[in-house]
Image (spheres, rainbow, N blue to C red):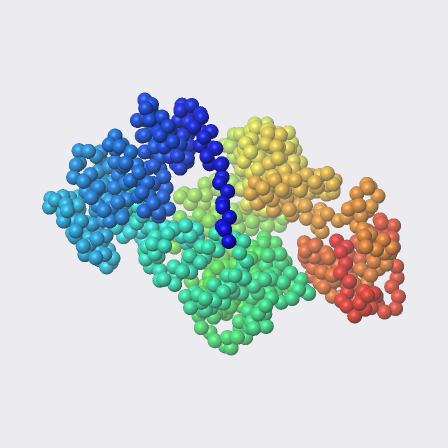
Amino acid sequence: MARKRKKQSSHGGSKAAAAAKQRPEVREREALQALESGHWRDAIQALKALLKDDPESERTPARRRALADAYAGRARDLTAKGMLKEAAVIWENRAALGADIPPSLDHGILRLRLGDPQPLIAAWAHPDALNREERQRVGEQLAAAVLSERLVGGDTALLEQLAEDDPIRRHAEPAQMALTAYCNADQNGMEAALAELPFRSPYRALAILLKALVRAETEPDAAREMLARIDDASAFAPLRRAAELALLPDAELLAELDRAGPRQAELVAALRGWSNAQLELARALASFQRDSGRQQKTLQPLLKRYRDLLGHDWAQQASLRLMPRRTGLLDPHPPGWNALSGHERALIKAWGTEPEGDPWDVLDAWEMVAQGLIAEQRGRRDAPYSLEIAMVLRRGERRFKLLETEHPEDDLDSPETIAAEQLERSLQWDPDHRETYLRLITWYRRANRLKDARRVLGQAQERWPQDMALLEAAMETALASNAFKKAAGIARRMLAIDPINSSARRRLVEAHIEHAAKQIPKRRGDLARKELAEARNWTGRGSGLEPVRAQLDLLEGLVVLALEDADQGKAMLNECLTQRGSGVVAQVELMLAVDRLTLKQDDIAKRLGLKRIKVGAPEDLRAIIGQLRSHADQVGHFRRSLLERLAAALKGAPWKRLERNELEHACETLRAFRLNAARREAARAGLNRWPRTPMLEYHDFDSRYSDGGFPSMSELDKMEGALARAREAGEMRAAERLRELLQQFMPFGRMPGPPGFDDDPWDDPFPPDPKDDGQDLGEGIALLLQVLEQMPLKQALEVTGMPKDMRRQVMRIAREQGDEAAVEMLKAMIYSAAEAAGELPKPQGGGGRSKARSADDPDGPPKQFDLF
């Protein structure tokens, strides 16, 4: 059978013919554009055709040089791809262009790599023909080739072609000795050999490389700086690149390792001390990092394959982490579930509760993990097992930081109490965890469980009797118990250990002032002045408490004025105010001192003849905000008379003359004092200058409704917009506060309102089923109420399709007030929505739960409702 002849394509010929018809100047311009843009093949083809078609042009020499540049670019690209023989052909084509085309060093370096050193030896023998950079480059290439020959096969053929006094030949022996000493971990031998290499040696880059590698482990930053001194064109640049990769952090190394060649990866592994198995694992992980679309289940066989390298326990834990989580009660268990131990099942469930679980669920889940570990260990008290149990018992509290609250909940079922009990049990397994003792002591003290605080404190001080943090906790506990003498003794112990510790002095001073204030209602001026004198003893010279000592003068004058000698007290206070300038700042300081001693503001002002003040200067406003912040940190509670006077003083203050950070600080301070009118003024002044600032928006919203009221839907929309902007800007503190504020007004999210306000069908809380237009809405509501009454609350919430956030809120209410209260609340919401929709629930007859079955499948599970 005759072969079918291939039809000749005329595309290439027509393209060349069309190009030939163009003027040479146009063809040359297009060829040079291709050359400039790095399209080497197009440039080569165009320039060769131009030289052939127009050989007599005066532009021929320039075109030949351009063709030489195109050949060089193409050859370098092929070399970078590892196509050395193809690149050599291109270099030979370049050399054949004529004697006016100078030879390229890159051509000679490629011939050296292919086994022909003669071009570079010839260039090296004529130093005057090379500039300094070119001679250094040729010398490094020949030096690297000499080392390669001597180390691999002991060959000296290349070396013998050089003169005896040639630096490459003279320095080869110490360079090889240095490299061998490094490989043998002989640092002294390496340094001695490198000392024989002069600064201008062709082996200088090798010396820098070896010195950097020696410092890599202890001084990685210095090693990187040394490696950066090796040029990219150096023969030792590939070794430098491998060393730089070896210095990268693990995650960055994996990303780069996937792009490294096999030889370079092997060198990186050697520098890191990896085995072949470790290198294989690293490259496999690098491919996973590159391909983010690969499923997690494909990682499990990798863990199984390298479990001996990774450790069986660690590989098992990682495999458990990769198992899919159940999102609902009816979801099937993942494959391999039945083969897991009870502890492993509990561990997977605990991990699954953490992302969105409430504190109760998380604490319960980790309690089950701890119980499983204890049951599996069967009384073993080995350190690793005991530590694992302790860490599990600390996990729930650590996640939610439950014991850091300022106002603890001491109910038996509160998450804080459960977390405290778990922390106490963790100390049975890890009694040397100092932070746990401190967290428990602080929480017990704040919860007024002083007996428990002293018990845990005693256990801790048996282990660390001189620990400053525990001594401070002991002092705070003593003060909370009104044991001032004991607290003073502890403070003296702290100062004996740390004489410049001002926090202990300050805390004792505050305690004495508090005790002095308690004597005012008893009209015991003598005892109050005694307490203030005790406080003054702790504020001596060098204590760092000079401002506090000045405050004590005001307090003492107030005690004398109110309880002892009015004239003397008035004289003392007037002197104090005069020393402070008698301005608004001094009067505010006096008002704060009056508040600390629980005296009446109007009475003291009348006795001293002081009028109400107004803050008008920005420097006074800044000073007063600082005073209020300090007072809030020291006291934390304020009398109404103080707040009224402060509100009047700050009304119309020059907030607009403060900077943004000053305004945010002022709003925080005013929030602590519940001065909401002044806070709103400050926030609005800031928003006029810096609109849509999340933290200022929060203070604006919060100050409006802290004293009561409910925002409109448009204002709630603005709050949600501010929350989105805060999250987008990364201002997580403002975002969290806005979230809490929204939750305060919408604890269950946006509830559907009654229909009829507009024609939007999505506003209907009980939309008709599109598959059954005849379905009765009242019957569905009755069925929903029946589910709430007959099923366990948690399961009923899942069956109704309620969102997770709302389910968590309902379960929180159930824990605080009981399941019945939560169910009644939900029923009230359903009745309200049904009434708004014009439908009342129809009574269910007879069989109760059987009515919740599908008519098509009476034995099937309850119907899934999607009310929410």
Residue 798 at x, y = what percent? 71, 60
The number of callouts visible is 0
For residue 348, what is the image quadrant? bottom right
Q: Residue at x 62, y 67 (%)?
A: 333
Q: Residue at x 79, y 50 (%)?
A: 765
Q: Residue at x 84, y 60 (%)?
A: 782
In this view, 30 is above or below 278: above
In this view, 383 is above or below 272: below
In this view, 183 is above or below 226: below
User: In the current view of this chain or complex, which residue is farthest to the front?
Assistant: 1
The residue closer to the viewer here, 485 or 102, is: 102
In this view, 388 is above or below 269: below
User: In the current view of this chain or complex, which residue is farthest to the bottom?
Assistant: 378
Residue 623 at x, y = what percent? 53, 34
Residue 618 at x, y = what percent? 55, 29
User: In the current view of this chain or complex, which residue is farthest to the top?
Assistant: 58
Whether residue 198 appears in this view of the structure is yes
Residue 749 at x, y = what percent? 71, 49
Instruction: Name the side, left or right, on which 223 lies relative to 410.
Output: left
